[in-house]
Image (cartoon, rainbow, N blue to C red):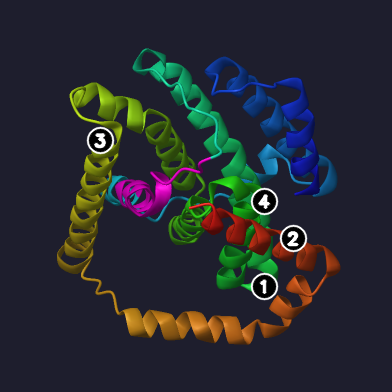
């Protein structure tokens, strides 16, 4: 995380722009991704080849993968992705640059999922259990994206759960990439479809559309698992299982979160959350 912070400060000094520029943003993303992958190789002794070796055959069918991607993306957008900070630079995205944004989204999705789910979550699962691993990788993921809160919190939890449930990194990478791509082009696409409406009206229509698609996808998932897989979801039972897992790894939580480094990171993240909400 410290490498990421220093890297972003360094890159921000090189690429100083007053508004969103797709070409420069791709350069920054590639450099930042290389920093992450090289750091994983040198500091954590984990290469791309090692991560691939740990991948299992996905437990999900093609229909499940599609439904879970839609669920993840539209949950994120219906809840918080249309929220933007007042001090953020303007985004000048154009639909003609669709494939450039796809390249950016795929590369970002790959290196972030490689680091947080393929490396961090996989190692924490082995030592401290799945629930602990999902929680702490979400904390670290949210800290890395501090200026975009609360979207990383939802994305971090869903990506971690998708990796644990499917047993394969391809699903989180696909969901993360599509989420990013959709995010870059959502507002320009809305303005293109509704040119006569004011920006605030377009945002409202987009948000309710995302929420409707999220509800529909949730219903389809429930129907699919109930009638096709014959699996019923019991929220109370699942919550008890999660709490039991947390209790059984209580020592791991205390040991990991009690280090001075993690205490400092948590403090910075709480300060950022407070600043984000106070700016609304």
Q: Position of residue 207 (x, y in %)?
A: 28, 46
How far apart are the two marked residues, 3 and 2, measured between alpha carbons?
37 Å
Label 3 belongs to which residue?
A: 202
Q: Is 77 in the magenta?
A: yes
Looking at the rendered structure, the secondary structure element under dot 4 is helix
Circles 1 and 2: CB atoms closer than 8 Å: no
State which tag comes first along the sequence, 1 or 2: 1
Image quarter of residue 224: bottom left
Label 1 – label 2 distance at C-alpha = 20 Å
Estimate the spatial distance between the alpha carbons at disc 4 and disc 3, rounded to whole Å.
Answer: 39 Å
Residue 128: numbered disc: 1
- Magenta residues, start to end: 69-86
Q: Is residue 276 left or right of residue 64?
A: right
Left or right side of 72 for 190: left
Q: Is-magenta flag for residue 271?
A: no
Of circles 2 and 4, the one toward us is 2
Mark 3 vs mark 2: in front: 3
Q: Tell me how far mark 1 sits from mark 4, CA to CA.
A: 14 Å
- State the residue at coordinates (35%, 18%): 95
* Alpha-carbon span between mark 2 and mark 4: 19 Å
Residue on which disc 4 sits: 119
Q: Residues within 10 Å of mark 2 (few under 14, many from 20)?
A: some
- Comparing 240 with 199, the one in front is 199
* Mark number displayed over residue 265: 2
Image position, residue 56 (x, y; %): 51, 52
Q: Residue at x 73, y 83 (%)?
A: 251
Q: Tag 1, which secondary structure?
A: helix
């Amino acid at each position: 995380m410290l490498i990421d912070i220093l890297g972003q400060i360094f890159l921000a000094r090189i690429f100083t722009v007053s508004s969103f520029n797709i070409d420069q943003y791709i350069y920054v993303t590639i450099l930042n991704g290389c920093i992450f992958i090289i750091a994983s190789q040198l500091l954590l002794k984990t290469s791309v080849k090692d991560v691939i070796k740990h991948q299992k055959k996905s437990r999900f069918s093609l229909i499940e993968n599609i439904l879970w991607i839609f669920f993840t993306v539209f949950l994120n957008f219906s809840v918080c992705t249309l929220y933007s900070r007042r001090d953020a630079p303007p985004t000048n995205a154009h639909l003609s640059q669709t494939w450039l944004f796809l390249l950016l989204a795929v590369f970002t999705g790959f290196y972030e999922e490689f680091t947080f789910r393929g490396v961090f979550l996989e190692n924490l699962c082995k030592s401290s259990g799945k629930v602990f691993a999902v929680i702490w990788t979400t904390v670290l993921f949210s800290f890395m994206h501090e200026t975009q809160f609360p979207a990383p919190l939802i994305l971090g939890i869903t990506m971690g759960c998708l990796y644990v449930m499917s047993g394969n990194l391809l699903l989180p990478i696909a969901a993360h990439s599509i989420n990013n791509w959709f995010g870059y082009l959502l507002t320009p696409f809305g303005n293109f479809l509704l040119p006569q409406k004011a920006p605030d009206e377009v945002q409202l229509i987009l948000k309710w559309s995302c929420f409707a698609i999220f509800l529909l996808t949730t219903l389809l998932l429930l129907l699919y698992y109930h009638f096709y897989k014959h699996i019923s979801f019991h929220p109370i039972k699942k919550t008890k299982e999660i709490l039991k897992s947390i209790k059984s790894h209580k020592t791991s939580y205390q040991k990991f979160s009690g280090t001075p480094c993690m205490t400092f990171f948590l403090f910075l993240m709480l300060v950022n959350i407070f600043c984000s909400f106070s700016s609304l």
